[in-house]
Image: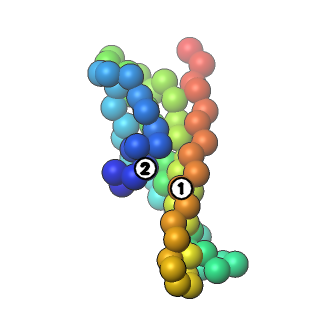
Amino acid sequence: MEAHFEKMPIPDGHRLVATGMEVKGARHGEDTDIYQYDELNVAGEVVASYEVEDSTSVYPPFSRRIEVSKSIREK
């Protein structure tokens, strides 16, 4: 998960909490998993949500692709 956190820079005092995971499985030569995270501020309020698509090639050289999408929560 460290590779995911590197793609989601958050302010000091904020933290990321895993909220879900979905296994898509192998398709089109890639094994894909989807992870969901919430970003909590110092007060513990959700300020943003992230969806991380983590794909690994099922064929050598087994390359990896990580894509992150962020949605900001309005107050």
Helix or strand or loop: what does disc 2 sit on? helix
Helix or strand or loop: what does disc 1 sit on? strand
**Quadrant position of residue 53:** bottom right
Q: Residue furthest front?
A: 61
The kind of residue on which mark 2 rests is His
Q: Which mark is residue 23?
A: none
Lower sequence index among marks 2 and 1: 2
Numbered label tally: 2
Q: Which image quadrant: the N terminus?
A: bottom left
Please tell me which residue is depicted at 60% across the width and 19% down the height of the picture.
74
- Answer above or below: position of 55 versus 35: below
Q: Residues within 10 Å of mark 1 (few under 14, many from 20)?
A: some
Q: Position of residue 45 (x, y in %)?
A: 41, 22
How far is the residue under mark 2 from the one under mark 1?
7 Å
Could you tell me if residue 39 is visible in this image? yes
Q: Position of residue 44 (x, y in %)?
A: 34, 23
Residue at mark 2: 4
Q: Residues within 10 Å of mark 2 (few under 14, many from 20)?
A: some
Q: Position of residue 25 (x, y in %)?
A: 57, 76
Residue at mark 1: 66
Please tell me which residue is depicted at 34% across the width and 25% down the height of the picture.
14
- The answer to whether mark 2 and mark 1 are in CB contact below 8 A is yes
Q: Which image quadrant: the C terminus?
A: top right
Please tell me which residue is depicted at 57% across the width and 25% down the height of the picture.
73
Apparent side of residue 22 relative to residue 69 in the rendered image (left or right): left
Please tell me which residue is depicted at 59% across the width and 79% down the height of the picture.
26
- Answer above or below: position of 55 versus 15: below
